């Protein structure tokens, strides 16, 4: 890599045309500048010697009294103005070195970094913020014994971890995590990215394991999630959430409800005020809004359209897809 200090050497060589010769400075002062540079390790010894020789040669070639010793003790070199420019050159070089080190430390900066900054300014997310990964050992340690229960019969290899960004109702940006089935991972990632880029509010998106896989606690916190292994009651079939093939969004404001033996069940129980779907409130999902449209376009069904019960938070893959991917899980 070229030394930025060669620019300083150029100033030495060119000073005869750039500077006047009416003021003076001692060699001791300029040597102090050299030592300052050396002490900060910003230039190697060879470069320092090059500068010394360049100055010495300059003095001999411009002074008819060539017997003057180059940079000897007590030698007087011309121009106070020259020292000012050398100092400016040092400051410029410090900036160049800092930029060079930053570029070396982050080779992806530059044009790509500018593109990402421009994208963020336009409300678009960088690719590195939205990604899919397999369930690594580190992630598995977070879910084992919680959403991935001891009796879980779904292979770990069938699950995928999603990392996304989402915005709350005030436009604040948050990192989000979700675990879903591998068959819908790309669809869900695309949906969540489009929701983010269009400022659709999602308040919270943590792994349900942050709530010890307790659905009620997660829903009361308005948390959006997917995978949580369980069997359908009184069967050996895995529920769609147990397969990671259902997604719940803004759960507090879009509760589940069903009447059983004349008694209304509401989940979460704190979601009762939001059963009135004609009312206007934040985070409500309704037909025709962006969240609804995107999930439907990607082949999901919405629980809010069911007649025997309502699950306004819930989007799931239809039974035909379950039969295709997990035929052993169909009656």
Image (cartoon, grey):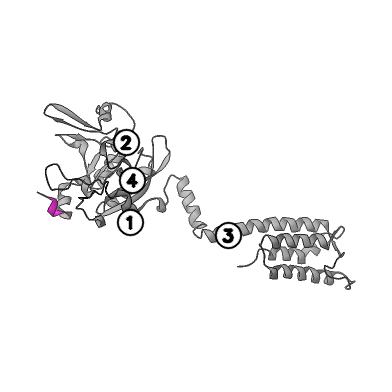
Secondary structure under tag 3 reads helix
Q: Which mark is residue 137?
A: 1
- Mark 4 surroundings: few (<14), some (14-19) or many (≥20) residues within 10 A: many
Q: Nearer the viewer, mark 1 or mark 2?
A: 1
Can I make out residue 277 in this image? no
Cα gap from disc 1 to disc 2, whole angstroms: 28 Å
Residue at disc 2, secondary structure: loop
Question: In the rendered structure, does residue 327 fall within the stretch colored magenta?
Answer: yes
| Left-right relation of 116 to 188 | right
> Residue placed at 77% from the left, 60% from the top?
32
Which sits earlier in the primary sequence, circle 1 or circle 2? 1
Question: Quick one: label 3, few (<14), some, or many (20+) residues within 10 Å?
Answer: few
State the CA–CA distance, disc 3 to disc 1: 34 Å
Numbered label attached to residue 192: 4
Of the two numbered discs 3 and 2 on the same chain, state the one appearing first in sequence: 3
Numbered circle sitting on residue 222: 2
Give residue 132's position: percent from left, percent from top: 33, 54
Highlighted magenta segment, given as a residue range: 326-330
């Amino acid at each position: 890599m070229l030394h930025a200090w060669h620019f300083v050497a150029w100033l030495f060589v060119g000073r005869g045309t750039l500077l006047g010769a009416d003021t003076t400075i001692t060699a001791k002062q300029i040597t102090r500048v050299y030592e300052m540079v050396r002490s900060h390790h910003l230039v190697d010894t060879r470069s320092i010697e090059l500068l010394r020789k360049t100055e010495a040669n300059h003095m001999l070639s411009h002074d008819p009294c060539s017997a003057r010793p180059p940079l000897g003790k007590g030698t007087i070199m011309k121009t106070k103005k020259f020292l000012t420019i050398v100092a400016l050159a040092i400051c410029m070089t410090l900036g160049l070195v800092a930029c060079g080190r930053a570029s070396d430390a982050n080779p992806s900066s530059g044009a790509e970094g500018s593109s990402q900054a421009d994208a963020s300014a336009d409300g678009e997310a960088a690719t590195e913020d939205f990604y899919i990964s397999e369930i690594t050992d580190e992630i598995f340690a977070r879910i084992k014994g919680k959403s991935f229960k001891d009796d879980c019969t779904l292979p770990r290899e069938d699950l995928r971890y999603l990392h996304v960004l989402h915005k709350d109702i005030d436009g604040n940006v948050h990192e989000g995590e979700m675990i879903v089935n591998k068959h819908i991972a790309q669809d869900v990632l695309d949906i969540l990215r489009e929701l983010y880029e269009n400022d659709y509010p999602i308040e919270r998106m943590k792994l349900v394991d942050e709530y010890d896989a307790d659905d009620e606690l997660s829903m009361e916190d308005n948390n959006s999630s997917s995978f949580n292994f369980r069997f359908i009651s009184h069967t050996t079939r895995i529920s769609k959430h147990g397969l990671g093939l259902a997604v719940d969004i803004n759960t507090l404001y879009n509760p589940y409800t069903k009447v059983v033996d004349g008694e209304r069940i509401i989940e979460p129980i704190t979601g009762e005020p939001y059963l009135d779907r004609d009312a206007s409130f934040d985070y409500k999902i309704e037909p025709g809004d962006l969240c609804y449209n995107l999930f439907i376009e990607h082949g999901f069904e919405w629980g809010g359209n069911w007649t025997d019960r309502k699950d306004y938070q819930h989007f799931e893959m239809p039974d035909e897809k379950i039969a295709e991917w997990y035929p052993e899980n169909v009656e």
